[in-house]
Amino acid sequence: MDQLRGFLGGAGDALINQAKEALKQKAAEFIQDAIQDTFIAKHVDSKRILPSIQNLNVLNSSKSYGSLGERGSGTRSRAEIQDFYAIRDQCLSQGVLFEDSEFPANDASLSYSRRPDRRIEWKRPMEIADDPQFFVEGYSRFDVQQGELGDCWLLAAAATLTQDPKLFFRVVPEDNSFEENYSGIFHFRFWQYGKWVDVVIDDRLPTYRGELVYMRSTEQNEFWSALLEKAYAKLHGSYEALKGGTTCEALEDFTGGVAEFYELKEAPPNLFNILMTGFERNSMMGCSIEPDPNVLEAETPEGLIRGHAYSITRVKFVDISTPNTTGKIPLLRLRNPWGNEAEWNGPWSDQSAEWRYISDDVKEELGLTFDVDGEFWMSYRDFLKYFDRVEICNLSPDSLSDDQISSGKKKWEMSTFEGEWVAGVSAGGCRNYLGTFYHNPQYVITLEDPDYDDDDGKCTVIVALMQKNRRSRKNMGSDCLTIGFAVYRVTDRDLAQKPLGLNFFKYNASVARSPAFINLREVSCRFKLDPGHYLIVPSTFEPNEEGEFLIRVFSECANNMEENDEAVGYHGPDHKLYPDLPQPPAIPKPDQELENLFMTAAGSRQEIGWMELKQILDHTMKGDFPRVQHMNGVYAEQRQNVTQNEAGGFGGPQTQQDPVQDVLGLLCGLVQQFCANQANEPSRNPEESSPLHARDNVQQQIIASEPVGFSKDVCRSMVAMMDIDMSGKLGLEEFKQLWTDIQKWKEVFKLYDKTGSGKLEAFALRDALASSGYKLNNHIINALGHRYGSRIDGSISFDDFIMCAVKIKTMMDVFKERDPEENGSATFTLDEWLTRTVYTIAI
């Protein structure tokens, strides 16, 4: 009876467990079906210039404006770096005026798509005006006047820049002068991809009939604005490259801030508060109206210019008192960069009747003037009605001066990271490609405190993703990658896994995202989020699109941002964190036959070098390499036709073919080629068409189809990895250890070579190395992908995978020798580092 009860109890438990599993499976299927986190892509037709900074001086920091730091932008410089101070001193000592060979005074600097329609003369300021000055009675937003170039967006940004002395002189250094140390050279500083760069120019400017063609000042002998435009044109490759930009793009380059865009026909209900917050935090703002497709810069009946960029210079609730009511009205002050009579003529314009309801004290506080200067006021309601787009550039924390902070200006909190997408490694595409999406770089942002004035207890967050220049040619437009990002709410338990894997994204939807994936230089969006942890995943729209990026997060209160990535180290996989990670089978120890083979190759010396090692490995592992055939100069990979049990290859069981059939197939191919050659080449050498020549071709074909084996570099690296005394030789015990490592790596490779092709598919490298015991972060995996991945599809061959594993093991062993306490820190002198690594670490 007890046995029966036990049996029934066990059966009941089994049924309950089965029911639980079935319920879990159904729940998982339901969740999977419920989460349809689909992303869309938008495309902008116009090509934009992504400047290259590889040949420019990069400043040490945003606060170190006078000293020049690293050279280049992380890429190898291809030309001499232009140092403003060194060039100026050289010109002064030689008594010559500087001529910039990198941005010469010719048509190529004007336009890259067509020749000018008239003869442009390049002249220095003293040839254009008497007594040229860099500044005339200081600088102001009225100094900026547009020329013939369609870059009103740049003028609007420059006019806005003049309102902040600290920002202005960071871009326009005060040591520019036509008097002190003048030698025809000037320099300006722009923010590019997280760095401040120094752009050097000469002062030759394009003119027509003695007049400046492009940007100019209201004062004929003032030239800071014209030279600023030239420096910005040089950064982008030509003046023509400045057509069709946005005000915020220029403001970002002038300030290092983060841009936002709002379509006013779809404006959020709190947009005026956003504009007010921006003004309080010294943000720079601009707006525009959609252009008329038939008329360039057409003027509306209200006096506004279509397709024109205006700068917003003030945002304020203004006290108003009418005979019927008293209260506050939201007003904005705007400026047309033309600086002329083209102004708004509606309510609250210059001399309009509405101003009689504003007290004189308020007018004085507003600095109200009614001049023909392109500046005017308008109501927020009319602003929404007549304008189409507003752009906001939120400044980085270091942009505010102490005086501005003490006067009530507030600053943003900012976090910044640089990263890259590498094909087959970290370019996983958007969430639409679920199987690879989790391979993208991941960042965790922690929001602790809500905004000070938020009644709902939420945090304001601005996420901005900017792609970097990927080219060395600066004067050509490029197709930007289609980029975007997704934001996920995560818990401490989720973050125990670094990085988060497929299952998290399979069953969790994003809580915020970029409005769309779009081919712009930068994508940004503002969110209101609850305090907590959030995961940001930046990506391209489709997988395997390579590029570099800069991701920045602005918040009103403090935030903490870090990469959600692996801690580098060597240890076995943690099954709690990696439950789905396959494990290779136990590795057999080298047998007596292998030892005999080693002793035969070693001879009396009892040691082997890389050549003997290659012979041993190629012989014992010949079933593990794809064959390479050569026919008419074209190489094709062919799997060996042996079963896995017979040769230990990567593929599953295969049908063994008759070698005679292989030879007959080759003969048929040669006969067909012979007939074709006879028909097409009657003058062919008779010896080449003889049966003997055909037989030789067959022999060469059979020889060429032998497995290629390990490369010389891999064998040398394996010897160096085990060769402690750096003799270039391996003894038997060293060989045994090496053999065990190779067998382990081979078994791991077989686990991830799902198709039996002899190659790891894209995105499998990280998991394969993790199964080998190596925990590596995205930076290292990206480097390995660049070094060993195929440039076609990112796949990695068996030979390259072994080379990759050898390099990782060797470098870790070298490091661990100097890190006995395993605290992740080691110290080497230069001599020690070179001595230890120049031989052991393969290049």
Image (cartoon, grey):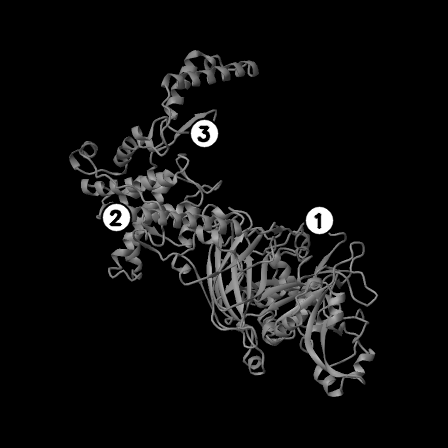
Residue 668, x across and y down, in percent: 46, 16
Name the foreground residue: 434 vs 837. 434
Is 797 displayed left or right of 360 in the figure? left
In the rendered image, the vertical position of residue 605 relative to residue 233, given as above or below: above
Q: Secondary structure at mark 1?
A: loop
Q: Earlier in the sequence, mark 2 or mark 1?
A: 2
Q: Nearer the viewer, mark 2 or mark 1?
A: 2
Is 592 displayed left or right of 83 in the figure? left
Circle 1 is placed at which residue position?
Answer: 114
Residue 827 numbered tag:
none
Q: Name the residue type under label 3.
A: Tyr
In the rendered image, the vertical position of residue 148 relative to residue 412, given as above or below: above
Asked if one can make out residue 93 in the rendered structure from this viewpoint, the answer is no
Q: Residue at x 65, y 70 (%)?
A: 270
Circle 2 is placed at which residue position?
Answer: 6
Q: For mark 3, does the 10 Å Cα neighbourhood hold few (<14), some (14 to 19), or many (20 or more) residues?
A: few
Residue 419, x across and y down, in percent: 48, 56
Q: Earlier in the sequence, mark 2 or mark 3?
A: 2
Residue 635 numbered tag:
3
Q: For mark 2, does the 10 Å Cα neighbourhood hold few (<14), some (14 to 19), or many (20 or more) residues?
A: few
Q: Residues under labels 2 and 1: Cα distance? A: 91 Å
Question: Are the residues flagged by discs 1 and 3 in contact, CB closer than 8 Å?
Answer: no
- Extreme-bottom residue of the structure: 361
Asked if one can make out residue 266 in the rendered structure from this viewpoint, the answer is yes
